[in-house]
Amino acid sequence: MKTFGLTLIIFFAFVGSVTAVSPPKDFSDQSSQFVVSNTESLLLVNARVVDGTGAPARNDQTIYIRGGKIAALGSRSEINAPEDTPVMDLMGQTLLPGFVMLHEHMFYNASDPDWFIQSTQPVIFPRLYLAGGVTTARTAGSFEPYTDLKVKQYIGNGRLVGPNFDTTAPFIEGAPAQFLQAPEIETDIEAVRFVNYWADRGMTSFKAYMNVKRSVLKAAIDAAHARGLKVAGHLCSVTYAEASDMGIDNLEHGFLLATDFVKDRQPDVCSGFPLARFMEMELDSPEVQALMDKLVKNKTAITSTLAVLARISATVNPPNEGAVEALGHGAKAHYLGNHARGYAQALENDIWERAVRKEMAWEKAFHDKGGLVVTGSDTTGIGGTVAGFANHELLKLLVEAGFTPLEAIRIATLNGAISMDRADELGSIAVGKNADLIVINGKPDQDIADITNVVTVFKDGVGYDSQKLIKSSRGRVEN
């Protein structure tokens, strides 16, 4: 029986040549046009606060922002601020922490059937991430490392607008590399040199890929950790259990890619996409439970990327209107055509939808065991995923998976900060933390569908107009 999606054996590879994008002529300050508040201090009054810890909402709260930090939080009478402090009345709107997303990209799938060509989006995707409430984003493997580093730099000095990026180096990959841009690192010495080279140039995370050897991965993890940096893995040749025992920080895309259960697998060899074996395994089996227990014990996070998984199955996730509006003519025509074909295939064979539902159940079970679930939208254009819009979709999908809205919000905020060892500054609304905040018209802690009603996003105390960011991006994502 033909299985829908199996032709995408490396459907997360997101690979190939990258199209350069020229900077706009007026490149001195791209951020100010979207700013609605940029003062040294600010009072947000009459807010409904969902703090990201999983605690219930608190009504009639005042947040005092000073110097980009949360200086005070409580009832208006408790806040001691100068009388001339500017005030923004939120009129009962909900305030969330800024999203901390750990699997993001700055390119869109141009869909060459042979080379999986990608088109860089260094201006529009950062705008859309911020518009959706993403204030901290980790890139998940770089195809244009110097572009990513410059985008991070330019956002910092106002020449571009977007989240604060944790930039990931080019993939740590073995031979044969899955795509043209990846190195083929075959020895431990090469791995250490690679990590140190990119760390010296400003990369703050690393990502291992499908054909990396165990000894190379271990050397890379040790070298990165020696510099206080994190390593994630989209793995195949190395099992989840092996990588967890090595100290890897994140395992990407949930459990669907785990090769731990593949029969007759060879060490250090990627034997193909493990979907069939995943579909055979039962959640309550001793093998699955033992793997989850190991990950919990070793504090290895699972990165949920349900938005891109569901996008591959047209029956799970139909087109998002806002995302389609962001696409240029060619990208839109390609996406809508692919969606129509994918829907027809999905109706013939529902294996991919069943796989997504199963992955949802496993992620929820891992969370309930005490495992750290974090998330990212994996916005590469696969299935029509677009920055910002896909971040909202994944929160909805987490709730569909059985998480409460409060749990889903925590996964997208505090859990990400915990995984990055930055929970003292990010991920929840608390005194002393960065003033990274999302103003939402609605109650997403009660109805997660309200997560799309973003009004203003504060990053480091500066407020940005979400709708202006979205409008400026319409029709500009092109392949």
Image (cartoon, helix red, strand yellow):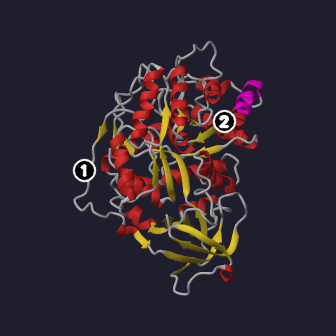
In the image, taking residue 362 as reference, residue 163 lies left or right, namely: left
Q: Is residue 359 above or below residue 53?
A: above
In the image, taking residue 450 as reference, residue 111 lies left or right, namely: left
Identify residue type, mark 1: Ser
Answer whether residue 275 is visible to the viewer in this image.
yes
x, y percent for residue 59: 69, 74
Q: Secondary structure at mark 2?
A: helix
Viewer-nearest residue: 21 or 174: 174
- The extreme bottom residue here reads 83
Q: In which quadrant of the rendered image does the N terminus lie? A: top right
Magenta region, mostly helix, strand or loop?
helix
Viewer-nearest residue: 339 or 344: 339
Viewer-nearest residue: 248 or 410: 248
Pointer 1 residue: 22
Q: Is residue 14 above or below residue 46?
A: above
Answer whether residue 327 is visible to the viewer in this image.
no
Q: Quadrant of residue 167?
A: top left
Magenta stretch contains residue 469: no
Pointer 2 residue: 358
x, y percent for residue 145: 36, 40
Identify the residue at image location x=53%, y=49%: 101
Identify residue type, mark 2: Lys
Viewer-nearest residue: 153 or 26: 153
Q: Is residue 47 above or below residue 458?
A: below
Identify the residue at image location x=45%, y=29%: 172
Identify the residue at image location x=62%, y=63%: 429
Q: Earlier in the sequence, mark 2 or mark 1?
A: 1
x, y percent for residue 265: 59, 15
Q: Which residues are magenta?
A: 285-294
Magenta stretch contains residue 290: yes
The residues tagged by marks 2 and 1 sit, at their Cα atoms, a distance apart of: 43 Å
Identify the residue at image location x=70%, y=67%: 57
